[in-house]
Amino acid sequence: MNLDEFKILSVVLIFVTTVLAGLYPFLRKFKTTRPLESPAAEALASGVFLGAGLIHMLGDASTSFLDHGIEYPIAFVLAGCVFLLLLWFEHLGRRLDEHGDSNSPAFAILAMIILSIHSLLAGTVLGLSGSITMMVMILIAILAHKWAASFSLAVQLSKSRLSLRQSLLMFGLFTLMLPLGVALGSGILEYTSSYPLLEPIFYSLAAGTFLYLGTLHGLKQSTMVDKCCDLKNFTFVVVGFLLMAVVAIWT
């Protein structure tokens, strides 16, 4: 199986997972905000996201900028900006929730925006990847995170004051973000000879969202905050990180 075929397979797997996990709340009209939990899978995904962001994306982006004569640490600046932007969005969501507005359309739309940014940039990384080994690890992490994120977003949309048509439209846009990201990443590869800085720029942006997914996504409910006191879950974080460190030997 070549890279393009694996990218297509990855998109199909993630798309099907997203749709199946998200349709159930709409069909059953769930009214709970309690998220689905799979601590071991979430912990492993956190470690993979953290390792991919730190070891692969930031490393590759920084090296690429240096190769083009840019000594300013722009890769870290871009990643930091994305990280802080996502953190700000989540704090806005928490503020709405604390004030009893969790059923507000604004809260649902904000959740969709946050998760769509994650999906778009994660898809871009898949599209940019030149190694099947790297893609397999990222695919596993995305799948481990995606089903719960899709379910939670669908719950939030279905319980909001948005109409069913509006909710389904929002969810549909969310499901398209990752395939769009893969297409974007693949397209960037076609233009790297003419625009060589596009690849490190998008790697830097994606690194920011991967670092956020691996650390503070969900704030106090995040794996790194809520579950790392459990040695078993923390072990899965370490395993995920080490897997990405090992993958770096061959990529």
Image (cartoon, rainbow, N blue to C red):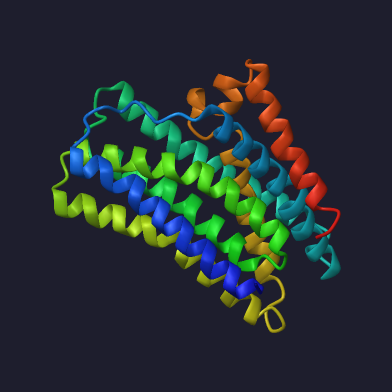
Which residue in the rendered view is the most extreme toward the front?
1
Q: Residue, x 65% and y 76% (percent of image)?
A: 189
Which residue in the rendered view is the most extreme toward the top?
229
Which residue in the rendered view is the most extreme toward the bottom?
194
Judged left or right of residue 151, residue 134 is right
Q: Nearer the viewer, residue 72 or 143?
A: 143
Judged left or right of residue 146, residue 201 is right
Q: Residue, x 19% and y 44% (percent of image)?
A: 27
Q: Position of residue 104 (x, y in %)?
A: 22, 36
Which quadrant does the N terminus fall into? Answer: bottom right
Q: Position of residue 39 (x, y in %)?
A: 54, 27
Q: Position of residue 103 (x, y in %)?
A: 22, 33
Q: Residue, x 42% and y 39% (percent of image)?
A: 148
Q: Position of residue 251 (x, y in %)?
A: 80, 60
Residue 106 seen from this side: no
Q: Residue, x 61% and y 26% (percent of image)?
A: 224
Q: Relative to 30, is 181 above or below? A: below
